Image (spheres, rainbow, N blue to C red):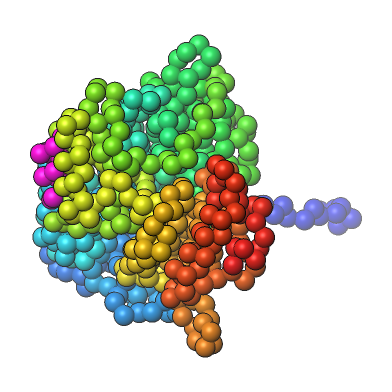
Amino acid sequence: MDEDRAVPPATKRKRGEGQWALGYREPLNKNEENKKNDDGLNVRRRIVDVYSKAGFDSIDPADLRGRFRWFGLYTQRKPGIDGGKTGMLEDEELDDRYFMMRVRIDGGRLTGPQLRAIADISTEYARGTADITDRQNVQYHWIAIEDVPAIWERLEAVGLSTMEACGDTPRVIIGCPLAGIAADEVLDASPEIREIHDRYIGSREFSNLPRKFKSALSGCAAHCTVHEINDVAFVGVVNDDGEVGYQAFVGGGLSTNPMFAKSLGVFVKPEQAHEVWKGIISVFRDYGYRRLRHRARIKFLVNDWGAARFREVLEKEYLGYALPDGPEPAAPLPRRDHVGVHPQKDGRYYVGFAPRVGRVNGPLLTAVADLAERYGSGRVATTVEQKMVILDVPEENTEPLAAALAEHDLQVRPSTFRRQTMACTGIEYCKLAIVETKQRAMDLIDELEKRLPEFDQPLTINVNGCPNACARIQVADIGLKGQLVVDENGDQVEGFQIHLGGQVGATFGKKVRGLKTTSDGLTDYVERVVRKFDEQRAEGETFAAWVQRADDADLK
């Protein structure tokens, strides 16, 4: 060896983000290791054959706090643990011996037998609990592991499932509840939702993603599926040749790093939707960041790459062809829901009604099924605003149905506060929560209706129990993020940080320095800021627009 020759330093491989496509296949955290050790879909057999028979104590921790999610199961929060301990205790200290179970309802559409099955399971196995989520699912609590196989049998007998309702999987595909019947829709997306579901949900091809993957497909004129905050969304458009199809959006999401989805600028024919969806989720699977779990959502990849590069990789590496350029969708309506009595394109009507913040129960859902059969065709739908719709109602039945729903406190013509307030699960059941949400939001609605009975402007109030934004706090007019605050006596109590003036697809809510409230002071604060808006607003001015020009003093 020539000792005078310089020895080059060893080449150090650049630290990767855990992207499979770039060769980083070794698990880089506990979650990735668990998924590599065993596919989450395999846990079903252990639940049926072992855990449901041997009981809660027999469950492997890697299944309990990991793979169970592949079948819609999370341990719920042990009662009596206050919010100050949420981030301090280990999982096993927070875990109750019961489960939250999520039933996926792709497209939000339910037949009469399906709704009855959901209602019966609530009554028999879930202590009557049932919440309509903001992704059109139904969520139970108090589920015992011993009862899970029987619940699955009941659901699957009517064509429903909990498979991939949670976990690092393609979760429920949301869609317009009026698909195929709305008089003003661009197109009916329900065939594409069914095709994607039937082809890919439960497929091991996509059962190990970097993180959750949320999809939306809709031709709704109101844009009720809030495409701007989904991982992938297909939105109905009409191109210059008069053809109906979809514009594709990727990379939306909220949580602690909110980002709006970016348009790919393409035109997707309806028959292409399933393969374009497959291409997009494949890009995420292969290029998604697996090293750090808090950066593992597709929005971080899209934010780093940009829409143009994402489209290029999609077309060249996954589709094998270029998509034509396409138009952007029309603007959404001021209220992106389907509450009230409205005509269908077949001459019948749909009747949308508002449970309070999605909280229902088994007997109530049975009553809804009865009313849907008595006054309509039996078909019912859930919405992404935690509401419900009864379809196919003859005109002469609309008012009798509205009156019958009102007897169950299900309002067809609700106040703004009932119509546009949503809340996450909160500390009652959620292990991540810091404050109570559902009852607090219901009490807020009741009190605001008494104090501001004439207020009728669009106004969204979203109540969240922690920073993770399950209730979309950053895109609400008034977004409430649960946290512990100090009251006037210097005591630490439940409260909220306040975000103001958020709009889906436009802007995230404004945070005014020091603007917080205790839970007990919440109603007084909301009343005060709503009155200020009502006094100062110009004709046609939205709350979000007013927030941008208002003095900070008027927002406190």
Where is residue 106, by image quadrant?
top left
In this rendered view, identify the residue nearer to me: 489 or 531.
531
The residue lying toward the viewer, choosing from 229 and 295, is 229
* Rendered image quadrant of residue 201: top left
Total marks placed: 0
Q: Is residue 122 magenta?
A: no
Rendered location of residue 180, percent (x, y): 29, 26
Is residue 86 found left or right of 77 in the rendered image?
A: right
Instruction: Kindly identify the residue that appears in the image at 42 percent across and 44 percent down.
Output: 214
Question: In this rendering, is residue 234 above or below 457?
Answer: above
In the rendered image, the residue lying farthest to the right is 4
Q: Main secondary structure of the magenta part?
A: helix
216 lies left or right of 181: right
Residue found 43% across the figure and 49% down from its top: 456
Q: Which residue is pictured at 34% across the width and 67% down the height?
A: 443
Residue lying farthest to the top in this orientation: 241
Residue at 27% across, 50% down = 411
Question: Can residue 68 be seen by looking at this rendering?
Answer: no
Quadrant containing the C terminus in the rendered view? bottom right
Give the answer, above or below, for where 553 lies relative to 360. Answer: below
Give the residues drawn in magenta, as a range: 366-376
Residue 458 falls left or right of residue 375 = right
| Relative image position of residue 263 (x, y in whole percent) | 56, 33
Residue 425 shows up from this direction: yes
Question: Residue 236: x percent and y percent?
Answer: 44, 27
Q: Residue 112 in the image: state x and y as whole percent.
A: 14, 40
Q: Is residue 372 magenta?
A: yes
